Image (cartoon, rainbow, N blue to C red):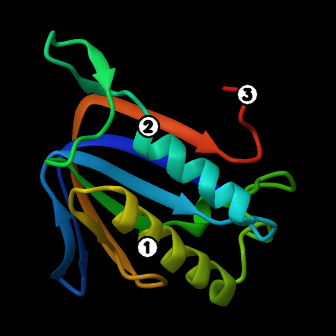
Amino acid sequence: MRCLLRRVTEARVEVEKSVVGQIKTGLLLYLGIHHKDSSEDLDWITKKILGIRIFEDGDGKINSPISESEGILVVSQFTLFGNLKKGFRPSFHRAAPPQDAQQIYKIFLGKLENEHPGPVQSGVFGADMSVFARDDGPVTIWLDSSNKDY
């Protein structure tokens, strides 16, 4: 499972020019699901997202995790598993098939909704989406459940 995590002051997702998800301050997550991902990957990435200390504390230092007043906006992004090994046209064969990925995506959203006391919003799985965001910092973190070394 891969997640590109962005700290934002605001973000929204539109489908056919209609807003389907939006947050103010919080995290914008692009989530890619690998065809071999398991519940352990899901648990690991959820724990990292909710525990990552990239928000300012009372002293103005980046030392706090997301709070209940901050939101999470999740966008499905199979292209995070794009592979350019054989040239310039990406191959997405490592991404989970859509029906499997959608099921895991729904479980992921449910975990976030259960474990994060603040708002959790999402795009529409498999839709052609427009994402608008205002980065804060910018702070951008890459998470990969199959490569936990960084």
Dot 1 amino acid type: Gly
Please tell me in which quadrant of the rendered image residue 149 appears.
top right
Task: Locate the C terminus and report the quarter of the image it occupies.
Answer: top right
Of badges 2 and 3, nearer the viewer stands 2
Which label sits on residue 51? 2
Residue 45 vertical placement versus 54 (above, below): below
Specify whether 11 is left or right of 27.
left
Residue 6 at x, y = what percent?
A: 36, 42
Dot 2 amino acid type: Gly
* Mark 2 residue crowding within 10 angstroms, few (<14) / some (14–19) / many (20+): few
> Mark 1 sits on what residue?
110
Residue 147 at x, y = what percent?
A: 75, 39
Quote the CA–CA distance across marks 1 and 2. Answer: 17 Å
Q: Residue at x 43, y 70 (%)?
A: 109
Of helix, strand and loop, which one carries label 2?
helix
Dot 3 amino acid type: Asp
